[in-house]
Image (spheres, coloured by chain):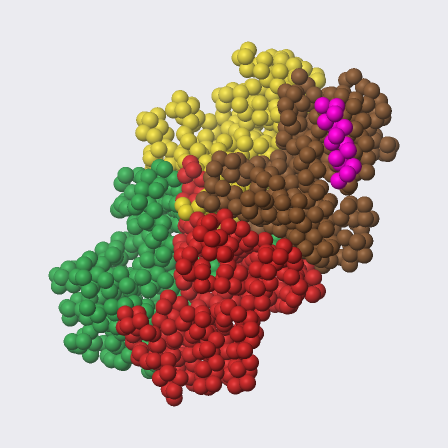
Chain colours: A red, B green, C brown, D yellow
Amino acid sequence: MTVRFAVLGAGRIGRVHAGAIASVPGATLVAIAEPMEAAANAAQAEFGCELRTIDAIEAASDIDAVVICTPTDTHADLIERFAKADKAVFCEKPVDLSVARVKEALATVEAEGATLMVGFNRRFDPDFAALKAAIDGGRIGEVEMVTLTSRDPGPPPVSYIKVSGGIFRDMTIHDFDMARWLLGEEVTEVTAQASNLVDPEIGAAGDWDSANVLLRTASGKLCTITNSRRATYGYDQRIEVLGSKGLVSAENRREANIELASGEGFTRPPLLNFFMTRYTAAYAAEIAAFVAAVAEGALTPTTGLDGLRALELAEAAAESVRSGGTVRL
Amino acid sequence: MTVRFAVLGAGRIGRVHAGAIASVPGATLVAIAEPMEAAANAAQAEFGCELRTIDAIEAASDIDAVVICTPTDTHADLIERFAKADKAVFCEKPVDLSVARVKEALATVEAEGATLMVGFNRRFDPDFAALKAAIDGGRIGEVEMVTLTSRDPGPPPVSYIKVSGGIFRDMTIHDFDMARWLLGEEVTEVTAQASNLVDPEIGAAGDWDSANVLLRTASGKLCTITNSRRATYGYDQRIEVLGSKGLVSAENRREANIELASGEGFTRPPLLNFFMTRYTAAYAAEIAAFVAAVAEGALTPTTGLDGLRALELAEAAAESVRSGGTVRL
Amino acid sequence: MTVRFAVLGAGRIGRVHAGAIASVPGATLVAIAEPMEAAANAAQAEFGCELRTIDAIEAASDIDAVVICTPTDTHADLIERFAKADKAVFCEKPVDLSVARVKEALATVEAEGATLMVGFNRRFDPDFAALKAAIDGGRIGEVEMVTLTSRDPGPPPVSYIKVSGGIFRDMTIHDFDMARWLLGEEVTEVTAQASNLVDPEIGAAGDWDSANVLLRTASGKLCTITNSRRATYGYDQRIEVLGSKGLVSAENRREANIELASGEGFTRPPLLNFFMTRYTAAYAAEIAAFVAAVAEGALTPTTGLDGLRALELAEAAAESVRSGGTVRL
Amino acid sequence: MTVRFAVLGAGRIGRVHAGAIASVPGATLVAIAEPMEAAANAAQAEFGCELRTIDAIEAASDIDAVVICTPTDTHADLIERFAKADKAVFCEKPVDLSVARVKEALATVEAEGATLMVGFNRRFDPDFAALKAAIDGGRIGEVEMVTLTSRDPGPPPVSYIKVSGGIFRDMTIHDFDMARWLLGEEVTEVTAQASNLVDPEIGAAGDWDSANVLLRTASGKLCTITNSRRATYGYDQRIEVLGSKGLVSAENRREANIELASGEGFTRPPLLNFFMTRYTAAYAAEIAAFVAAVAEGALTPTTGLDGLRALELAEAAAESVRSGGTVRL
């Protein structure tokens, strides 16, 4: 079976997913929906697919699955519409900025018996997947402490910050999902500290640009998350997991694997600097996993519940910073 | 302009090039020629192209370029035929195992004013290209000493060894090309040592499985090449270039960028173990460079002369082992 | 001027300091005080010095400085006695397990105008000192986020745990000192999580064996500390400091700088496994710095205040775990 | 038994050995012989030993062993004198620049039944010793190919070059010894290339500053040696050994184990830049091994024969460059 796709939204991430669909055997891109004419035409030219409205896609019999890459505030509505329209749904994170609205949308998904996968692309990165496989293979014994480092090369525009839901819901949300995935248990205690060290305008917009978070599970497993909106040396994405028998870690990736040595020292190039180049393979593997699940009628590797849990941790972290106390879930 | 391709030979390397053509904008794969029915059908299914005979491709008006991936002993003939048929020619290394036959074929190419690129894929590897760019950008000053390490994960079948032309023409030939490319000068002195340390049957077949080569240019620049047909830890492909101002080196690539630590130590995974996975990006970049040159009517980045020079160095190395002396070119 | 030393206590750390004194120009070891006869005789044989009682050392005119390596509960008393006896005092951390008692002892030191250096050996490690020099030299701009990883190879005996003051006062105290040193500001907010993951007997003894701590300064600089009483791969001691212009990090040290590659991967040896071998150079540099300060009548690089501040942070961390809230200082 | 030492020559390397003797248990430095008054007084002050003439040391009954650190052209004479005087002899490499003279001196040593150790310090470097132990422990199977990289930070004065015996006898001689040690067999074929790329005055003095050497043993094991008199990035000393089951390598050492990351990349400090700091531990271990052998009446780990074989390889390499052919031994 070939899974026939429509992509909703032809912005940056929409084009990433359209490209991933084109590269995955067993998937075909039928249509893109994009209200901006220039972006729509560019996407059509790049991917050689049709342009349709969202309404047309909803009604289409030649579409099996949709990938939702529209603005965040439309995600929940679209999930509900396409769950009812009997399409498999892949939705970019977050499902919504409000926990209540997420729960509502998930209830609809469940009532319809629909398929919903939430886009936590990092789980599909080959390095992180190899790290997880080492854990699952018993190579480090029991997981005890997870250390996540995520730093962006530079902050987004303040206009984006204002609609992003804040650093915890926009950026740390990926780390919350990784933490749950790696800890193998739900988090029960969240405590966080945050500051404005990069750009005072981010603070003026009511958000933080630098944050550390501690997580703890019911059985006592621990996790630290370190985030910054600025890392001059590139897109810093590292994981360490300590277990009873050892440690497994995943290092960053750089464009070229070379080193220059001189009187100033030994220098390797900066890191891959952009999430789209850093996670190219992850995006392709993510769509491939969605395609496989849809084709086989199997459970998707991430679900709406993963989206909900990560959002709850984000809210707890923000509350912890504001209240100065640990938040229990 | 879209360059319309036919691939001659649908073996392992033929399919690599067919896949590369499919991935390169500005190129399209029209046909494959392959005498073995099963291989031909598999290739057609995989790439969705036509199956044609070599004669039909030679006569076709909808083919601009051919990629020769047939057995080595047919390369020179096919180069001549397609040069006369006014097709741009990309030929896998080597052009031929005989220097005299290579010269003949190149004379035909020249007489026809044809385009011929020889497949030295390593020049197009992103890491090696970044290393070369560092040299060309003056980062290490004047090039003085090049060190090339090339080791295969394991030896090919002895049946292949027998028709391969020997380790220097089959394996070291890539290093000879890299040496010329990195030294930026022609080699004038070659000396080599070789042994049978991996498999006595390779020796029985008249070849060596382990070899070291020294090269020197007229201005005194030096190069060492280290080859083995066996490296238990993977496909070992490294370069170091010492210059008057510094050193630049390219490290190996592994599948996953992870590390496991325990009481036994800190362990990273073995290297990518196969030339097709190790050099995937290089093959794509190589075909892209060929396409660009054909589309623009420009000189290809490697030419028949590069194929000839590398073969002459291979012959000199073999002669040096046999005679126990330095061979001057 | 040669600084004439007595070392109080010839246990493990006492012998480390005696050895350091022997290796430092400008210092001489005159006497050791040790009540256990076997240990005393062994130390005398090893260092070729006299054996004296603490009373005799207090009264001696040929001793300029003492190094206190006796059990923790004697530290404060000995500091007061030798401050009054006009000896320069170097005291192993901690000064005492009680903040109140530390303040009392420091008041005596101040009243006497005495010299007191507290043994935070990590500041003197060559790698960490080079990291600090890079920061002080402006190489990473403004310090924003400090990440400290400290893991012991294995837990101490539970009998030691019971008198240690707990993980934060015994183990994390080094990290608290490093955090203050690297942040360059006093910490104003502390929050922590801790668990028993290594050995339930440690929990039964009222302590934790795994802990994460977050620190924040008044200006918003942030720090994470990760501790475990067990790391199968060796004594894990790493630092990362993110600044506005870059990142500086210090890696672990291993006994041999070799790597073994095979089909199982590329393996480097485990880490140096013991604080005495890992920090040999640090202990020597620490005593050298004390000697230099005493000889020149200058301020010592660490003081009693550093001991006090680190202890306050340890108490705050323990309180945070117990209360589940951020502790403000 | 304590081995009582005299050091002949208080130049740079003489002081290194005097310091090593001071640090080794079971050894004591009784006297130094040094004709230059200033150097003699400085050494006496530093090491607190007597100053004696070589004649007095030869006649002394309180000296068990001598360390010869005088100019090269006096080595053979002194070896003979002290072998006859019944002292154990440690001599810095080379024994002499002439193979014939070395053979003469070794004959005297043998006739006297004397102990002679030649100073090939690299065998005692902790990293290289760990690498050798891995080989001897069967970790890489049968040794097949050895790769030695030795580059000096910068060339010595041309005045030194003129009396050095040339690059192969002065610098590569260490690599020849390492090659024999690691190959575990005698070398039977030597071929080399050399150039003047660093300083034309070295060429005017009749020497080369850049050289590559290939070695082969009777059983076919292979070795490459790469030397340069200039490496802007520090004192480059690396080893790789390929075996039938794997590869073992030893990396360089740098002063600080830190890394700075910024928009320009990830930079580690240059290498330890001087043989005396790079090989401090090796010099101490070397003297300790000599002391142990003398104290136990055992064979020293290196002997005069090792000095002779390395010199023969040096002569063969020079002859190979001059003749353009492989030299068979």
From what the image shows, is residue C313 above or below residue C63? below
Q: Position of residue B11 (x, y in %)?
A: 35, 73
Magenta span includes C108: yes
Judged left or right of residue A147, residue B23 is: left
Residue D203 lies, with reference to residue B150, above or below; the image says: above
Main SS of residues in magenta: helix
| Quarter containing the N terminus of chain B | bottom left
- Nearest the viewer among B288 and B314 is B288
Residue located 62% across and 43% down the image: C187
Q: Residue furthest top?
A: D37
Instruction: Give the vertical position of C252 relative to A285 (above or below).
Output: above
Identify the magenta region: C99-113
Q: Is residue C117 visible?
A: yes
**Relative height, residue C117 to residue B132 (above, below):** above
Q: Residue at x 43, y 37 (%)?
A: A264
Residue B13 in the image, given as x and y percentages of width and height: 35, 69
Check the image and name the residue furthest to the bottom.
A61
